[in-house]
Image (spheres, rainbow, N blue to C red):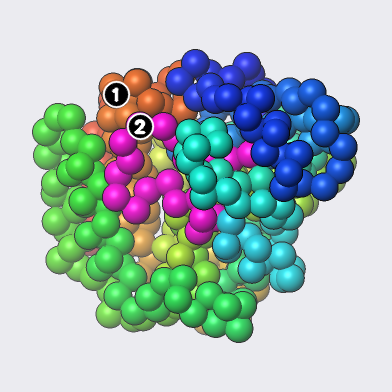
Amino acid sequence: MSELVEVLPQHRFDEARLATYLDRVLPGAGGPLRVQQFHGGQSNPTFLIERAGECCVLRKQPPGPLLPKAHQIDREFRIMTALAVTDVPVPGMLHLCADSTIIGTPFYLMEHVAGRISAEPQMPDLTPSERRLVWRDLVGTLARLHALDWQGLGLRDFGRPDGYAARQVKRWSAQYSAARTQEIPAMDRLGAWLADHTPREERAAIAHGDYRIGNVINDPAAPRIVAVLDWELSTIGHPVADLAYCLMPFRLPFGGAAAPGLAGLDLAANGIPSETELLAHYAHCAGLARIGDWSYFLALSIFRLASIVQGVHARSLQGYASSANARSMGARVPLLAEAGLAVIAEAR
């Protein structure tokens, strides 16, 4: 499970006020409250709440100024509530609070799911055989998500089914510009190429938006996924964008400074399926003959990650970041941009 630490100074809130509020909105016994923070999250601060021997998880907007359309925890709450009746595993939703006066920003509460979270795509805490099963389950679970009837789940207005790629380029270009702290020519070139080469094929599904190894909980006793987390960026979008983001580590260097990657690692020795095998597994699960525009969505995924990392770096300079290592993020952005340009060059 993610490491628990004392609440970081920039994320402290009135715990007594929260305890009073929980006594009012959640059933069960009250009593003293213990709050710990999950270490490592770069976006919405997340906390383990313990009271009277029971646990739940609180996830809130961060303090300080926010970028447009960022940190929309109400969307997280809505999508996970909708998915509760499907075969895509999510924590149970308990309560959404839009009142910023309780702990400073809106928040929601969800069930605590016990298990293991691997922050790195190599999953060093697992055996080779376990890694293989988890990677295949990761891709299979994504295929099940993309197969859901999103309109039937009440998500007709959760996002626009058309023009997803163009909107993503526009959104993340704007996010990057709003968080820019220095000139990075590679980011400008990558964004321009993506804007000029938008795919023509339109497909629509529930898109998680940040689907990766670090955002799932594995069963503590078996190599299978028991919960998918962090739905902040979810929308109705192109399913290949989700798949590309999930498999992006195969295009980033293992041990590199940009982001956790797998390129250069002996995949077979570590029990990790290849990108080609996982693409075939997804296509089989999704009933597809082919996966189109793969290189485009890979480059878009890297561009988006670079934009997110730039936003984390900018927030660290303002003193609001959720993780202690956020200030070092700025150096990763040009490395990621170059990786995106390499994907484009290879496709050519």
Q: Position of residue 284 (x, y in %)?
A: 63, 74
| Amino acid of disc 2 | Gly
Q: Residue at x 79, y 40 (%)?
A: 114
The quarter of the picture where the C terminus appears is bottom left
Q: Is residue 126 magenta?
A: no
Q: Position of residue 338 (x, y in %)?
A: 24, 40
Q: Residue at x 17, y 58 (%)?
A: 193
Which residue in the protein does label 1 denote? 318
Q: Residue at x 36, y 61 (%)?
A: 297
Q: Are marks 1 and 2 in contact (CB under 8 Å)?
A: yes
Q: CA distance from mark 1 to mark 2?
A: 8 Å
Side of 3 where 200 appears, left or right:
left
Q: Position of residue 145 (x, y in %)?
A: 61, 68
Q: Is residue 63 magenta?
A: yes
The secondary structure type at the circle numbered 2 is loop
Q: Residue at x 22, y 60 (%)?
A: 170
Q: Disc count in the image?
A: 2
Image: 279 above or below 314? below
The secondary structure type at the circle numbered 1 is helix
The quarter of the picture where the N terminus appears is top right
Classed neighbour count for the residue bearing mark 2: other residues with Cα under 10 Å, few (<14), some (14–19), many (≥20)? some
Q: Position of residue 87 (x, y in %)?
A: 74, 68
Side of 316 where 150 appears, left or right:
right
| Amino acid of disc 1 | Gln
Image: 347 above or below 263? below
Which residue in the protein does label 2 denote? 64
Q: Which residues are magenta?
A: 58-76
Image: 185 above or below 15? below
